[in-house]
Structure formats: C-alpha cells, structure tokens
Amino acid sequence: VRLALLPAIYLMENVATEELITKHRKSKDIVEEAIRCKLKILQNDGVVTSLCARPRKTGHALFLLGGQTFMCDKLYLVDQKAKEIIPKADIPSPRKEFSACAIGCKVYITGGRGSENGVSKDVWVYDTLHEEWSKAAPMLVARFGHGSAELKHCLYVVGGHTAATGCLPASPSVSLKQVEQYDPVTNKWTMVAPLREGV
C-alpha cells in the first residue's frame, strides 16, 4: 500500500491510531514516515526522497509460444532470474500463423490456422495472474499471417490473409485491408479505418 497517497486525515486519524500499528514499532515507523512524506507533499516542501515516494518497479515477463511440431500448442515463461524456461498451460486450440499481443496481464492469441488448415476467427486469452486460458469474442474476419498491437488498452489486428475459397492447403488466399479493434472491457470487436492495400 502506498500510504503517503492516502488522504491525510484518514492516514492520521485511522491508520496511525490503529492498535496493530501502534503496538508494532516497525509498523509505527513506516506510518510516521508516510505522514511526514504526506505533509511534505501537501506543503510543496521540496523534493520528497523517502521510500514512500519512490515509484514501484514494474514487473515484466517474457512468454514464448511454440511446440514440437509445426502447430503451436505450448506456452512457456522465461524466468530471467532463475535463467530457466517454465512450461505453462497448453494452448487449448493448437494453431499456426496466428498473432499474439499482451494487454496488461493478459496475452491474446488471434486467428491463425488450425490443424485442418481452416482460417480462424478465434481469440484465446491467457490470464498470467490466474494461469488459465479462456475464449474471447471472435474477430469479425477470419485471418492468418496478420499483425496485432495494443493501443490505449485496446487490441488491434491488422492485415493478414483469409481463404478465398475452401480451406484446403492449396486454396488461394486474399490479402486483407481490414483493421479490427477489440475492447477487452466490452468483449466486442469493431471495424476501424482500413489499410489502403492488403498486407
């Protein structure tokens, strides 16, 4: 808890007087430091350099998507401290030529081609906190070989290809101009301005 960011009155009247705090020396010292920090902030009294004012370090994780065959069905976490690769929950629907993008603590896998070479609209979401997969609303256009990116907490999928006719491996594909936006809050896809040419 960032104590110095609590309202001053609440910090002094509720937190500082809490019995668990007053009876434990280290806790009492932390709260007193937070009060001093809060008062400096309120009085605009120079630069606040105490621990309570330092920004927290953000956590980052690197996930690898792969497998033993040409189909991707595995998810791994690269533990940089332990210098090892840790297997995580398998991808529920193996695929190839998909796109992956993170928004916050969730990894989104969009589209691709499944084991039958059919082009997919599916969207799978890996929650890194709960370590589980779930399905999100499907894209509006089935695609593979596309790109995806996060912008302002929304997911964008761009270009790629879709099958022109049939789903056989030799079927021709069409380059897509369509760009879709996904809002994780509403679980809805919308078309946005298209590209000038399919990519």
Image (cartoon, rainbow, N blue to C red):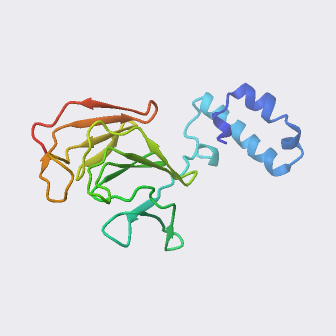
Q: Residue at x 77, y 30 (%)?
A: 12
The answer to whether 181 is drawn above or below residue 90 in the figure is above
Query: Is 16 left or right of 71, judged from the image as shown?
Result: right
Q: Nearer the viewer, residue 45 or 54?
A: 54
The answer to whether 77 is drawn above or below residue 192 in the figure is below
Q: Nearer the viewer, residue 71 or 28?
A: 71
The answer to whether 169 is drawn above or below residue 189 in the figure is below
Q: Position of residue 193 (x, y in %)?
A: 20, 30
Q: Residue at x 13, y 46 (%)?
A: 174
**Number of marks:** 0
Query: Is 170 left or right of 108, judged from the image as shown?
Result: left
Q: Position of residue 19 (x, y in %)?
A: 89, 39
Q: Quadrant of residue 122?
A: top left
Q: Position of residue 108 (x, y in %)?
A: 40, 48
Q: Residue at x 22, y 53 (%)?
A: 145
The answer to whether 97 is drawn above or below residue 28 in the figure is below
Which quadrant does the N terminus fall into? top right
Q: Nearer the viewer, residue 55 or 165?
A: 165
Q: Residue at x 38, y 59 (%)?
A: 94
Q: Position of residue 118 (x, y in %)?
A: 27, 52
Give the residue at the far left of this rendering.
Answer: 197
Q: Quadrant of residue 169?
A: bottom left
Give the residue at the far top of this rendering.
Answer: 9
